Amino acid sequence: MVDILRIDHPNMNSGLVLPDWIVKGTLSMKIPSEADLVTQSSLQEFPIGAQFKRNGRMHRYCCAGETIAIGHQGFLKVSRTICPGGTGGGGSEAALYQDAALGDTDIYIGDTTDRAKDYYEDGFLVVMNDTTGHLDYYRIIGNDVATTLDYVKIKIAPPGLKAAHTTTSGTVGAYRSPWIDVRSKLTAANQSWFSAVGMAPFPITTGYFFWLQTAGPCWGTGASTWPGQTAHYRDVYANTDGSLIGYTAGYQKVGYLLSGTQADYGDVFFMMQLDQ
């Protein structure tokens, strides 16, 4: 007989990791349950990008950018945000719209596209200052609505900018969160240019929120040849459609096999390594 103890106190072994600063109203003040890990929600209950670890498996709180249908549950999911500067890019790569002082937390970036409120939630601000030689990174808490403007006002956490930055100091890159637009790699439009970020084992409605597994023991769908059917090859890679394959040059590694295999019998139970 093994004695077990359930920890209900939210500050004891909860497994929930939150950012230091979040958008007000994005936290439900509860610890996710096992049921929450396989349930979608039309309301945002946690900050985008929040981490939750349960039974050795890591999860991230995400928003679905498309409906992920029945039949996609064993295929890897991708982050569909496009880098700033690319066609249809989901961010900004430009000089600041107005000067920012040391310690500022309200930053006016030169993004001329209309943006919804908190479009940049949990995103990243990369500031390369040609004057001081600094390269600094900041987490974006959120942003104001921007309609017919030449800028987007974003919020970063105190103590704010580590150095003053002017409109002529150099390029500023604003990236969206990799967890804010998650889609299925089985969908053809999501296959060639996007990174796998995890596995969601249930159908999800577009615009709904859910927990995506990003690390730890995981099972997926194998391709025509499963991982482990070649001697010594233990790594698991993402196939073009999000199924699992063995080592393939140029493809994304997503983990390694947990069980021994044979030449005529591979496996798809693996240790996912897409988070830390």
Image (cartoon, helix red, strand yellow):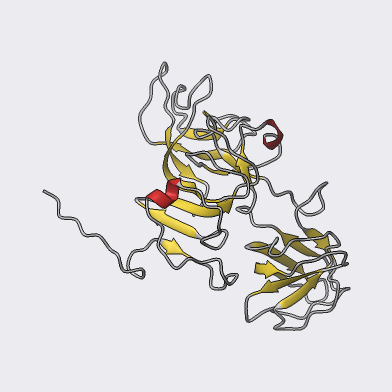
> In the image, 234: left or right of 154?
left
> For residue 26, which quarter of the picture?
bottom right
Spot the residue most to the left.
1
* Residue at x 44%, y 57% (from the top left corner): 52
> Residue 36 versus residue 86: which sits nearer the camera?
36
Q: Position of residue 117 (x, y in %)?
A: 71, 65
> For residue 144, which quarter of the picture?
bottom right
* Residue at x 48%, y 65% (from the top left corner): 28
* Residue at x 55%, y 42% (from the top left corner): 204
In the rendered view, tell whether residue 163 sits above or below residue 153: below
Q: Position of residue 165 (x, y in %)?
A: 80, 77
In the rendered view, tell whether residue 179 sits above or below residue 230: below
Spot the residue most to the top.
264
> In the image, 244: left or right of 165?
left
Spot the residue most to the bottom.
102
Residue 233 visible here: yes
> Residue 227 versus residue 117: which sits nearer the camera?
117
In the rendered view, tell whether residue 231 sits above or below residue 87: above
